[in-house]
Image (cartoon, helix red, strand yellow):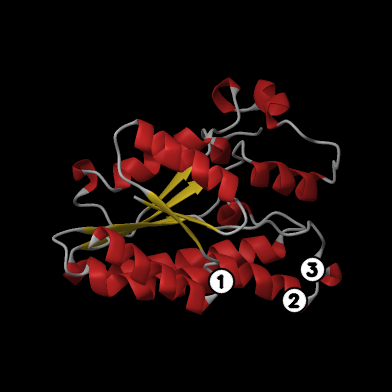
Amino acid sequence: MAINYHSGKEGAEETLQAILQDGGTAKIYGASVADYAESSKMVKEVIRDFGHIDILVNNAGIASRGKAVADTDAAEVEKLLAVHAVGAHQLCAAVLPSMRTQERGDIVFISSVATANNSAKGAPYNMGKAAMEALALTLAKEERKHGIRVNIAAPGLVETDMGVRLSRSLTGNKELTDLRSLDENAPFGHVCQPIDVANVVLWFCSPGSAYVTGQRVQCDGGGAISSY
């Protein structure tokens, strides 16, 4: 398994050790998906080290600052689009030649319920994820003939560092530090955990979803049909 990181090297190393301790094979690669030269170099290194790429999970993401459109400059919009959409586009393009040589390939995009909710004061993030989903659905049509499935996992609020930052920007509560404080009012009694999203990704890449492509699974505990 190839683990990519940009600023979160510590988390990448923790993931690496967990995989190795479980008997797996893995290596970490530092690169910004928003930098075409870096991401292309990384893909070449992964193929050199592992021989091929059969699964790609596009999960790089950054939060917007939680400002209204009238108070947001173009630089912030461009920054989020570069990571969420353009970077994912470039990474897919670099990976496809290798993936097409395999009997089956899978590309999973980690999007967000933001594309369905389009919350106020989140335009750059909403736009980035919407563009990502457009890319995914287009790619699903283009790559089906090559045996490549392309799907979208769209979680709601997830207990991660980014989840905390996103919650702060959207709610204006700069003191929020622990998302578990929201458990009482969350579906099933807890805020979505990373493993909940990982399980959706795992299913997308499993034999059980061999006839599934171009689909979007919303992983938010049914938040779309109820109120947090």
| Residue picked out by circle 2 | 75
Where disc 3 sits, the SS reads helix
Is 200 placed above or below 132 here? above
Q: Residue at x 42, y 34 (%)?
A: 18
Q: Secondary structure at mark 1?
A: loop
Q: Earlier in the sequence, mark 1 or mark 3?
A: 1
Looking at the picture, which amino acid does disc 1 mark?
Ala
Q: Amino acid at mark 3?
A: Val
Q: Viewer-proximal residue, 130 or 44?
A: 44
Q: Is residue 224 above or below residue 148?
A: above
The picture places residue 54, in percent across and down from the top left corner, at: 25, 58
Rendered image: mark on residue 228: none
Count of labels shown? 3
The residue that label 3 is drawn on is 69
Disc 1 versus disc 3: distance between alpha carbons?
A: 23 Å
Report the residue that reaches farthest toward the left.
Answer: 103
* Residue 26 on image: x %, y %: 35, 47
Label 2 close to label 3 by CB (< 8 Å): no
Q: CA distance from mark 2 to mark 3?
A: 12 Å
Q: Residue 131 in the image: x percent, y percent?
A: 53, 69
Bin the neighbour count of mark 2 within 10 Å (Cα to Cα): few under 14, some 14-19, many 20 and up: few
Label 1: how many Cα within 10 Å (few below 14, some 14–19, many 20+): many
User: Counting residues from the N terminus, which is met first, the one under dot 2 or under dot 3?
Assistant: 3
Query: Does any portion of residue 99 appear in the rendered image?
Result: yes
Q: In the displayed structure, does residue 63 sit left or right of residue 171?
A: left
The kind of residue on which mark 2 rests is: Ala
Mark yes or no: residue 138 visible. Answer: no
Q: CA distance from mark 2 to mark 1?
A: 14 Å
Instruction: Give neighbour class at mark 3: few <14, some 14-19, many 20+ (Cα, 10 Å).
Output: some
Residue holding disc 1: 34
Q: Nearer the viewer, mark 1 or mark 3?
A: 1
Left or right of 47 in this view: 10? right
